[in-house]
Image: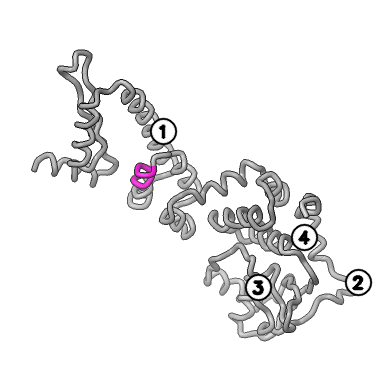
Amino acid sequence: MRKALGKGIDALITRVQENDAGGQNIRKIALEKIVPNRLQPRQDFDEEAIKELAASIKKHGLAQPIIVQEIEGGNYEIIAGERRFRAFKHLGLTHIEAIVRKNMEDSKKLAVALIENLQRENLNPVERALAYKKLMSDFSMNQTEVADFCGKSKYAVSNSIRLLELDDEMISALRNGSMDEGHARALLSVPDKAERKRVFERVISEKLSVRDVEALAKTFNKSSSKRNKTAETKNPEVSQAEAELERALGAKVEIIPGPDHRVGKIILHYYSLEDFDRIVFKLKN
C-alpha cells in the first residue's frame, strides 16, 4: 500500500475526478440513498456556510458533482463533497449528480476527503491533526509518508500532530476558534502544565496576542532554568519554606538567600491582575 501511496495526491485526485468515456459514471442519485463518509476528517460544519453554498447552488447550479462509492444495500458513501450534499438537503432537493467510484481503498477515501477540505474548506487545526493521525494509525504510515502523501513538509505534519498534546479545554478552544494555531504552538513551548494552563486562561480572558504568549513562555522558561540551577544548591530548609509559602498563598514563590544567608529576597509570581489582587489580599489579611 505504501508504494502506491507514494505516487502523490495530485495523481490520485485526478484519477478520482476523471469521468469514463462519455461521462457514463456520472449519475443522479437520490439523497436518501447517500450516507456521509465515515472517514470524513471534518467534524464541524458551519451551518451559515452551508446556507450560503445552498444559495449559490440555487442560483448557479452545481459546479462539480460529488464523489461517492457504491456500498451494500444499493446505497452510496460520500468520498468528497459532503458540504454540497448538505446544501442540497437544505434546499429540499431530492437528487444530486455524483461521480460513482468502485472499490476505493479506505486510505484513498480518507486522503481525498482530507485534501478536498484542506484545499477548499480549511479544516480547523484539530480536525487536520486528527486526520493526519488517522492516516498514521489506520494505514501504518509514518510522518514522512503522510507529509509526502498530503503535499506538506514533515515539519508541518509533526507540528500539527503535536497540537493534540494540549489539554482537552485547550483543544476545544482551538477547535471552536477561541484561540488560533499560533497561540496553541506558543503554549506547547511551556512544558510546565500548570503554567501552561495559567497562560491559556489569560489568552481567553485577556485576548493575549501570539507574541504575548511567546514572550510569557520565554520568560517562564528562562526563570525555570534559573530556578533549577538554584535548586541544585538550595538549602533543604529554604525549599521547604518555599513550598509552605506556595501552599499558603497559592502562588509561585522563590526564596533567594544572599551570600551569607542572613539576607536575601522573596519573589512572588503573579500571572494576571486578578492573580495579583488575590495575593495582595492574602498578604494583607
Which residue is depicted at the point 82% across and 62% down?
15
Residue 111 vs residue 271, the one in the foreground: 111
Q: CA distance from mark 4 to mark 2?
A: 18 Å
Q: Would you call the spot at circle 3 few (<14 residues within 10 Å), some (14-19), or many (20 or more)?
A: many
Residue 269 picture location, percent across and down: 26, 36
Task: Look at mark 4 in the image and give the residue it sits on.
Answer: 13
Residue 231 vs residue 123, the one in the foreground: 231
Task: Look at mark 2 in the image and give the residue it sits on.
Answer: 21
> Is 187 part of what is drawn in magenta?
no
Q: Residue furthest left?
A: 285
Secondary structure type for disc 2: helix
**Left or right side of 21 for 136:** left
Q: Amino acid at mark 2?
A: Ala
Magenta region = 193-198
Instruction: Classify residue 277 by image quadrant.
Output: top left
Q: Is there CB contact under 8 Å for labels 3 and 2?
A: no
Query: Which label was assigned to residue 84?
Result: 3
Q: Residue furthest right?
A: 21
Q: CA distance from mark 4 to mark 1?
A: 43 Å
Task: Look at mark 1 in the image and give the residue it sits on.
Answer: 218
Instruction: Classify residue 285 by image quadrant.
Output: top left
Considering the whole magenta stretch, tell me its main secondary structure: helix
Residue 91 vs residue 102, the one in the foreground: 102
Query: Which label was assigned to residue 184?
Result: none
Q: Would you call the spot at circle 1 few (<14 residues within 10 Å), some (14-19), or many (20 or more)?
A: some
Q: CA distance from mark 3 to mark 2?
A: 25 Å
Residue 147 picture location, percent across and down: 68, 47
Q: Is there CB contact under 8 Å for labels 4 and 2?
A: no
Q: Residue furthest front?
A: 236
Q: Earlier in the sequence, mark 2 or mark 1?
A: 2
